[in-house]
Amino acid sequence: MLVTRPEPDARHEAEALAARGHDPVLAPLLEIEFLPDVDFSLEGAQALIVTSRNALRALAAHDALDEAIALPLFAVGETTAREAKALGFAEVTIGPGTAAGLAPLIRREVHPEKGALVHLAGEALAFDLKPVLEEEGFDVRIVVLYRTHPLPELPGNVLEDLANGAMGGVILLSPRTAKTFARLLQGQGAVTQAKSPVCYCLSQAVAEAVAPLGFDVRVPAHPREEDVLALLDSGAPSS
């Protein structure tokens, strides 16, 4: 099983796969660069929005941490919420697992007149909440705390495993990772050589990013990593 997510999550996912009896092959397709010198203000903010654990990891080393943890926080899903609580956030609202699904929850829980919403994020957003929430009258500030750098090419051992059928599946947990995987495979001329591995995708947006490859794609009912891993054991039909 090809593990494509960035470190340190790649190592944790590999351990989970090994515990299920799978043979993980690590090839993180994105490298995370934290931006510790970003200057931002939380003055007038009523709440924070976090759609990535990497934003919280970047915040952990930032001077604004103490001020930030005093605010309520909307987390995209359960794992991000756990990370936020471990960092010291006391008031955490848990979303359904996608940024698109988080927007209606935010609209129900807070009101524009109470102050700005600050989205702590990466440079590339899978789903931009700002225009969606601004349509409802919210003032949304995006603070970029990290950026990602894609791998320049797939490692030779990965190409070999894909070509000889040894790679039974590829786990893809973000649209950016899926797009990078598809682009590298196409760019290295390896799509037709690959023995059609199953792509296990966190969400429909991730599946759409890898669809041009023509591989079997499977998506869980809920966008959670544990549900993606459960697909490996369930023999669920393709999405």
Image (cartoon, helix red, strand yellow):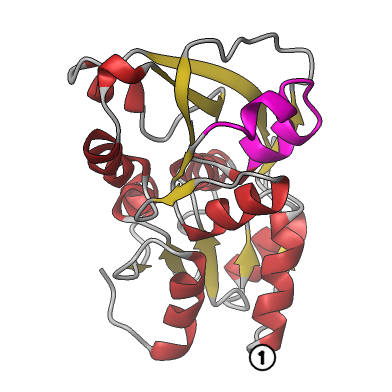
- Of the pair 40 and 183, the residue shown nearer to us: 40
Q: Quadrant of residue 187?
A: top right
Q: Residue at x 34, y 28 (%)?
A: 129
The answer to which image quadrant residue 136 occupies is top left
Question: What residue range appears in magenta?
Answer: 54-71
Q: Residue at x 50, y 55 (%)?
A: 173
Q: How many marks?
A: 1
Q: Quadrant of residue 31?
A: top right
Q: Is residue 194 visible?
A: no
Measuring from the top left, give residue 40's x and y in whole percent. Answer: 63, 10
Query: What secondary structure prevails in the magenta region?
Result: helix
Q: Identify which amino acid the numbered label 1 is placed on.
A: Gly
Left or right: residue 133 compared with residue 119: left
Name which residue lies at 67% across and 77% down.
16
* Residue 68 among those drawn in magenta: yes
Figure check: 12 above or below 87:
below
Residue 181 visible in rendering: yes
Which of the two residues, 10 or 52, is positioned nearer the viewer here? 52
| Quarter of the C terminus within the rendering | bottom left
Instruction: Tell me if 3 is positioned left or right of 26 in this view.
Output: left
Give above or below for 2 relative to 142.
below
Residue identifier under label 1:
21
Image height of 162 relative to 98, above or below = below
